[in-house]
Amino acid sequence: MRPANNGSVFFPSGKRALALAVGLLAVGLLASAQQPQRRNGEFTLVRDVDLVVLHTTVVDRGGRLVTDLEAQNFAIFENDIKQKLSVFRREDVPITVGLVLDNSASMTEKREEMRAGALAFVELANPSDEFFVVNFNSDYYLDLESGDFTNDMDVLQAALLKTKTRGGTAFYDALRASLKHIHRGSRQKKILLVITDGVDHLSYSTYEAMLLDAQQSETALYLVGLPCTEEKRDCRRARRILRKLADVTGGMAYFPISLDQVQTLCRQIAHDIRNQYILAYYPSNSDRDGSFRRVRVKVDAPKRYKKVVARHRPGYYASSDQNGAH
């Protein structure tokens, strides 16, 4: 990366961006799950390449969070084979968070609501969270004066106010760069909050490459799809892409009808990720073949809940003997 003229860190686009992004696949594969420990009374996870960690949200039929379940209420299946639950926690663990914000010209009339939504999310942060901010248009910028990550609210506000909307949209490139950067963070749990209309005109990256990076990153994507003013066909495709990104990472995609809903949705996202279960297991299939393993969490909730749904990443890539990664 090189500094931009405005003091931001500039992620180069074009062929240089692709060269930087090539390493992302390895980064995603090298991100390993972790074992539980307590340090100074706080629950943490230490590296263990074999443990599969699932940050799981449980909601009822009305979309309300279900936060009072016990370990016996959960069953985990990998490729339809039941696994032994090794870790069960209900704690608000520190998170590495990337705020990825669309600053293209199409966002001009939406900029203030987008910034307010990001700030509303940050206001509900854990003091031990670490943040970075990526503003993107035709290019993409790491907008922190204080370095790669911060939990200083004043620094975050300055970063969110820094740029003006202009130019086209290189969404795919910006997302791939953000997924790469988040693995420099120190927290096991990783989240990207993305606010955009999802339409991409200028990326060198393909949709397929972006989707694969997201699937391999072990980062949950929460996406707020702002009202789209582009061609209807482009808007429909953008919605499908945002939903798919959420599906493959265990996050969620939201599509506010009006801009005044953005802050409420961002607060809801922050609340949801603060009330997740930590489920982890050692796979019964110990082959290090690099294959994709489908994961399903079944919830046997008490009768007072009519119906519940567990949201989590749908699978993971096993370690490979070639790269020793998870």
Image: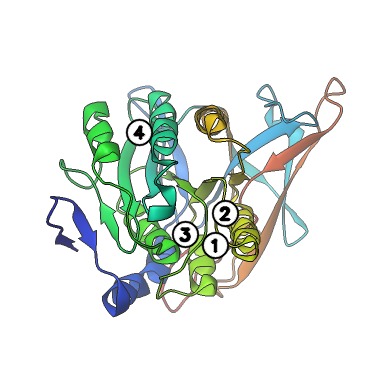
Residue 129: mark in rendering: 4
Which percent across, then down, holds residue 135?
A: 32, 50
Q: Are marks 3 and 1 in contact (CB under 8 Å)?
A: yes
- Secondary structure beneath dot 4 equals loop
Residue 311, above or below 247: above
Identity of the amino acid at label 4? Asp
Decide: marks 2, 4 in contact (CB < 8 A)? no
Quadrant in the rendering for residue 233: bottom right
- CA gap between label 3 and label 1 equals 6 Å
The amino acid pointed to by label 3 is: Ser
Q: Amino acid at mark 1?
A: Gln
The CA distance from mark 4 to mark 1 is 23 Å
Residue 89 on image: x %, y %: 56, 31
Q: Earlier in the sequence, mark 4 or mark 1?
A: 4
Q: Are marks 2 and 3 in contact (CB under 8 Å)?
A: yes
Residue 143 visible to an observer of this rendering: yes
**Circles 1, 2 touching at the beta carbon (< 8 Å):** yes
| Spatial separation of the CA atoms under disc 3 and disc 4 | 19 Å
Q: Which residue matches tag 2?
A: 249
Which residue sits at x=43%, y=38%?
114
Q: Which mark is residue 119?
A: none
Could you tell me which secondary element the residue under label 1 belongs to?
helix
Residue 2 spot, x, y in % from top left: 15, 63
- Which amino acid, by three-letter code, is at mark 2? Thr
Q: Residues within 10 Å of mark 1 (few under 14, many from 20)?
A: many
Q: Secondary structure at mark 2?
A: helix
Q: Nearer the viewer, residue 149 or 134?
A: 134
Q: Residues within 10 Å of mark 3 (few under 14, many from 20)?
A: many
Q: Which mark is residue 215?
A: 1
Task: Return the residue at label 3.
Answer: 217
